[in-house]
Image: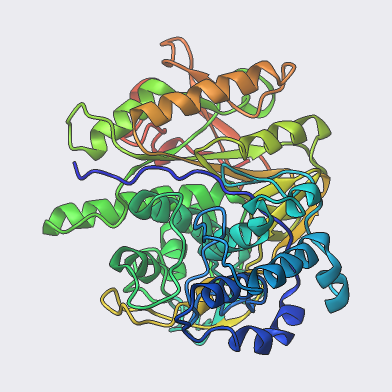
Amino acid sequence: MTSLPERGEAPPSNSLCEEDTAAAVASSSSSSEHKEDSSSKQSKASILSGVFTPPFTIFEGQQDSLPACEKKSPKPSSGSYAWSRILRRFVGSGSMWRLLGCAKVLTSSDVWFLGKCYKVSPEESSSNSDSESGHAAFLEDFSSRIWITYRKGFDAISDSKLSSDVNWGCMVRSSQMLVAQALIFHHLGRSWRKPPEKPYNPQYIGVLHLFGDSEACAFSIHNLLQAGKSYGLAAGSWVGPYAMCRAWQTLIRTNREQADAVGGKENFPMALYVVSGDEDGERGGAPVVCIDVAAQLCSDFNKGQSTWSPILLLVPLVLGLDKINPRYIPLLKETFTFPQSLGILGGRPGTSTYIAGVQDERALYLDPHEVQMAVNIAPDNLEADTSSYHCSVVRDLALDQIDPSLAIGFYCRDKDDFDDFCSRASELVEKANGAPLFTVVQSIEPSKQMYKQDGGLGCSGSSMANDDDLDDSGEAGEEEWQIL
């Protein structure tokens, strides 16, 4: 098996500004983007570019702007160092944001963002260390995540004649974002950031190609709706996170079968485990991560070999009726501290977003509710314009406003990573006071039966299946489903 990149370390962070205000200072940025021979001028330009970069074009056609915590420059002997110190203090104190008329999204508390912790303390920002560039580090990370939104102008979906998913496709787009992060983490590692210059990495371009808006792209909205027909997915209709997870399961299985039939390459280089519940507890009980099922899925992915493969876990949950039960909120927050975190498919009722981080009692998310023109990036076009797949505007909502129907994602790179996930999940169960998000077991006891829940319309139904009825995905066969 091809060796995979290691996970990166977490740099510190600071706060963000709204998109339209940041764009107003774009001209201030452009003047510092020419190449300098002097090391002092390079240091000054790097600082300016990390602060005044406009959203959506943050990495398009600009110079290298690595945060100072990752790329330290020697202190220049000229007066530019004094100017740099003043500018850094100005940014760190929040005076710049007040001058520009935009409110901070982030407070001085820690931010947990897809398994990384960012320190945004104002005390750190005004210290003599390089942590004052935390704003640039967080912005670079956030803006490197794949952002997928409503699109218009694509080929009609099946026989629906719809060429746009505006007002109904947000759950599909949110799920595409989560899966896209898993593929980026797999191919390029958690520490990967979108580079400032072209040509781009072929694997990065290859991931974006998979999510284009046509039937020719493996994980397009067209193919997801086709795969999810039996779970209620249809063009023009909104669906819940549970049905969305099942649609992904069907699409990936179909994609794998087609690749095997023609001897082609896998588009999805990992096993997929949609975690369901057992017979204990209300409404089917908390979902149960079964280690033996995960091992079997990895074996199936490796075509019978006993070696462990990377694995994506999707955990659909219903954490209340009309509102999320407050007892689950601390547990949800802690899942973002897992190094395996891929965030949450969730948002306000009927309005899906991709929640990628938390701070205090706020969820930080990427919003799919922006209409853009359809884009299909060819897999060999390393010079493609990818700006519509990235956003630097951090939006937030209160955790207690999240729809109780949601799904959590985790990516485990190998067996050690999966074992670490199981250990963290078991510790989380101990903190749950009898109401865990999900549990972890070694195996399913023969006397147990597995439930399957349908959250496609925001309600929960269940049916039971014997272990003998489990298919090769670790779930019950299609004929065992009952929608209540």
Q: Is residue 2 above or below residue 327?
A: below
Q: Is residue 461 visible?
A: no
Relative vertical location of residue 117 with respect to residue 88 in this rendering, above or below: above
Asked where in the image residue 104 lies, by quadrant, the reply is bottom right
Question: Where does residue 77 sit, x and y in percent of width and height?
Answer: 58, 67
User: Is residue 446 left or right of 266 when viewed as pictured?
Assistant: right
Residue at the spot 51% in from the left edge and 78% down from the top edge: 387
Q: How many marks?
A: 0
Q: Nearer the viewer, residue 101 or 46?
A: 46
Looking at the image, the residue that sits furthest to the left is 263
Give the vertical position of 440 relative to 482 (above or below): above
Residue 345, percent from left and from top: 61, 51
| Residue sitting nearer the eye, 478 or 78 | 78
Q: Position of residue 197 (x, y in %)?
A: 40, 77
For the residue pair 115 and 266, the one nearer the viewer reads as 115
Q: Which residue shows up at 47% across the image and 71% down it? A: 64
Residue in front for this viewpoint, 11 or 349: 11
As drawn, 113 above or below 43: above
Q: Say left or right for 421 vs 113.
A: left
Q: Position of residue 282 (x, y in %)?
A: 69, 24
Q: From the viewer's perspective, is 256 left or right of 316? A: left
Query: What's the residue at 69%, 46% (across, down)?
Result: 119
Position of 404 compared to 80: left or right?
A: right
Q: In the rendered image, which quarter contains the N terminus? A: top left
Q: Residue at x 44, y 52 (%)?
A: 248
Picture quarter with the C terminus: top right
Residue 91 figure quarter = bottom right
